[in-house]
Image (cartoon, rainbow, N blue to C red):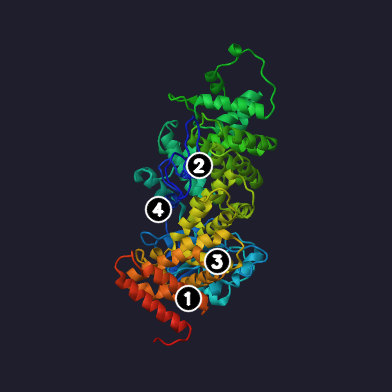
Amino acid sequence: MSGPATTHIPGAQGQFHTGTGHFFSIGTALFKDSKGRDPRAVARDELLHLHQRYVHPPGFGRARTILDTERTVLLDGAPGNGRNAAARMLLYELRNRAQTFRELLANEEEDATSRLPLDGIGDGDLLLLDLSSVDERLWREVHGELSALRETVCRQAAHLVIVLPHSRVERLRNELDAYRCAIARPRETQVVRRHLRLEGIPAANMLQFPSALNEFLSSDRMLGEIAAFSRLIISARDSGQVPGGFSEWCEHAQRAADDWGKDVAQLVTDIRTGPERALILATAMLHGSHADVVERGAAALLRTTKYPEDDTPLLERAHLPERFEKISVTRAADGTVRFGKVDFDKAVRRHFWDHVPGLRENLRDWTIATAAKPELPDFECDRLVARFSRECLRTGHVPALETLVLQCASAPTGSAQLRAAAYALEHGLNDAQHARSFRRFIYEWSRKTGLSRGLVQVLVLVCAEVMSVRHPDQAVTRLLHLARREQGGTAARDALLDLVRSDHRLHRRMLDRLARDVPQGAWPVDTDLFLDLTDPVLLTSAGPGSRPRLTDRGLRRGLTMCWNALFKRLPHHLWEEQVRRWFTTASENEEHADLLLDVLVNAAERRGGTLARLYVIARHWVQPPNPVPGSRDTLVTRLFQKINAAQGLRAA
């Protein structure tokens, strides 16, 4: 995702930028793509894109019926058959306009008392639990909790789709087998036709597939590979560099799908000098950038690898057009440079990464330095970080990407390197194979004190804007740790409050967490968080299609426990203003007045001093210059009656 944007995280302090080049601050909506979409909008659009191109496989209809009637379905099938896509489409069909689904995660910590978040399911939730890649040990432990998870889902009127591990040794329990449904493979030709037709390829062109496309499909291809091949055909059409029609586009796509491996190897073999190879690699990493930027990038790559200085006089060296022509790179009218074949840049990056392993650390350092260059626009910086990240993730070099994040995040506030750190983390979190590692990194960092200001900014943004889209509970946990250790600002706290206030279930879970932690008094910010989360207007307001949060018995329990801790631990002047707000809302909201008063009175636990203080606050609150005393007098009388009842006294 790239491009400028303007979203603000509330509570962040603005900064002025009077120079040239990059600027990054916590108030910048970093994660906006070139269309101005944030990660949440991108996720919605990706689901819509999948829905439009989705071919229902054998078994999908039965899975839909099981989910509708039993609220839980367990998808089985061979890897590559599209089980995860089927799960997403089943849940997509159930969503309402504002709702989407979220993913549950198995707790893999060794000391975890439960592997599945049974307490994290809200009313009407749409849930996906992907177990396709868990190992046998974790599968056995999760397997034992699936029945309890299903019971919770039914009790909450939620819906759950589980993707089963295919090569599991332990058989599915009998009580769960009734909810299992095998997803088979759709016809490959239907998948290709659906993708290409939606991209404007006429149906008449696909009555008979070209030999290149038939040859590609003759191999045992995963559905993801087929979708990627379809995109290559469209890229060949749109590139303007492939003469001919549909047949030629398919031939070009076939060569690109084979990764141009032989072509790249031949090019690198023919080009023997360091400066020319540096230009090849810089072009691949900065593909689509201006020729001047690429040339400077190649020179910087030579310095990073400690290549000897070229003592040839400047006027005697080959000019840029000649150098680019020698490596088969074309220069457009706007000065940008590209290889003449679709996805050839990707093949070049793969070649150098795979076959010159000693270059990887140099490439990481070069990427960090290049991302900070003021002449590199933000979207090109994002593109560069994405390309480096993909190579790390493709080959499992997670530590290399972790190092890039930490080094970039140690840069001064306002630096473009902070942007690079955030984007690298985003790519890690969105990678199906390695997302777990990056969630763990963020968790470990968030629990440390003394983090650099830059790293805190990056972590707050990534948790609030990226992790919260698919894993909001994990985002809340990490933001809470950051807020507790925050120094010199409130960005983490503000982002946490925004996220929790936006979701009834998260609000309730946060109060449950604070109910456990506030009595211990270990983190002063917990008290502030609780007071911020007890806005009585928020608690008594009904959202679209939902009840007021205060009507949730579990949420009231958390409120009562937290108020109890505050009454015991803090002097009254720190909490009485919030009590007055509760009285005001109760006087204006007859429907929920008793619930508000009951929480406060129950939290006092019959302690005479606390109950007396509540009554004194109420008497002061009702006195002039406050207007319309009638409703307030009535509320004070009601409070007095509840206090008497709590103490076992009969009203006079």
Kind of residue at disc 4 = Leu
Question: Three-letter amino acid code at disc 1?
Answer: Ala
Q: CA distance from mark 4 to mark 2?
A: 32 Å
In this rendering, the label closer to the viewer, 4 or 2: 2
Residue that badge 3 annotates = 570
Outermost residue toward the front in this view: 624
Which sits earlier in the primary sequence, circle 3 or circle 4? Answer: 4
Q: Which residue is mark 2?
A: 25
328 or 482, which lies in front? Answer: 482
Residue 198: where, in percent of width, then height? 37, 47
Q: Say the numbered circle drawn on residue 612.
A: 1
CB under 8 Å between discs 3 and 4: no
Q: Is residue 630 above or below residue 17?
A: below
For marks 3 and 2 on the same chain, the one whose residue lies earlier in the sequence: 2
Q: Nearer the viewer, mark 1 or mark 2?
A: 1
Q: Are marks 3 and 2 in contact (CB under 8 Å)?
A: no
Above-or-below relation of 562 to 242 = below
Toward the viewer: 260 or 123?
123
Q: Specify which label sits upstream in the sequence, 1 or 4.
A: 4
Q: Nearer the viewer, mark 3 or mark 4?
A: 3
Query: Mark 3 or mark 2, which is nearer to you?
Result: 3
Q: Which callout, 4 or 2, points at the residue further toward the start of the chain?
A: 2
Q: Helix, strand or loop at disc 2?
A: loop
Compare marks 1 and 2 and give the one earlier in the sequence.
Answer: 2
On the image, the x and y values in percent for residue 327 come to: 57, 25
Determine which residue is flagged by label 4: 48
Residue 59 position, x and y percent, is 46, 65
Q: Quadrant of the C terminus?
A: bottom left
